[in-house]
Amino acid sequence: MNQANCTTCPAGYYCTANSTTYTDKICPSGHYCPPGTQSDTQHPCPQGSFNNHTGQANDSACSPCTPGYYCGFPGLSTPTDQCDPGWYCTLQSYLAQPTAPEGGMCVAGKRVTSFVFCIYGKSSTCLLFMMRNFLSGLALDSLTNIVTFRSVLS
């Protein structure tokens, strides 16, 4: 055999040097493997995202981190943890105490950032609102997510 007989490793798999097969080298969760990937950790999902499936072929397999959680490292198969007490995390947070636009500090009874309000109580809940058709000048029209966080007040 010579190099002319070598073929490119298919998407969703990785092929190490001198590989004769790829079927036992499926791309691990937290990563994606486009054609020609040479190692299992060559293409990690970036921080702020995760991928809980194996055999993924491109970066579209990396999901934004779940609201209420942060994804602090590249290559995660699940979010790292919940945001720190007194903080809220929106999509793609990569810090436990994020800043806008990935989240922020929740102050009871105060508006923290546009369309995010915190309610005082035994445990606090931030309501994350989304304004549709902003450029059309329409008002706030939909509650899109409720982001809960561990409260320093509980």
Image: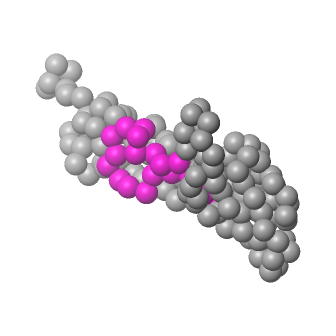
In the rendered image, residue 66, in percent from the top left (x then y), is placed at: 56, 57
In the rendered image, residue 149, in percent from the top left (x then y), is placed at: 71, 67
In the rendered image, residue 27, in percent from the top left (x then y), is placed at: 35, 47
Front-lying residue, 120 or 3: 120
**Image: 153 above or below 57:** below
Determine the image quadrant of residue 81.
bottom right
Report if residue 56 lies within the magenta region.
Answer: yes
- Which residue lies at the image location 16% right of the left edge and 19% below the top edge? 4
Front-lying residue, 22 or 134: 134
Q: Is 52 displayed left or right of 88 in the figure?
A: left
Q: Quadrant of the C terminus?
A: bottom right
Magenta stretch, residue numbers? 50-70
**Image: 99 above or below 54:** above
On the question of residue 141 being in view, the answer is yes
Determine the image quadrant of residue 8.
top left
Report if residue 73 lies within the magenta region.
Answer: no
**Image: 71 above or below 3:** below
Determine the image quadrant of residue 5.
top left
- Which residue lies at the image location 62% right of the left edge and 64% below the top edge? 146
In the rendered image, residue 152, in percent from the top left (x then y), is placed at: 84, 71
On the question of residue 16 being in view, the answer is no
- Which residue lies at the image location 77% right of the left edge and 48% below the top edge? 113
Q: Is 77 displayed left or right of 131 in the figure?
A: left
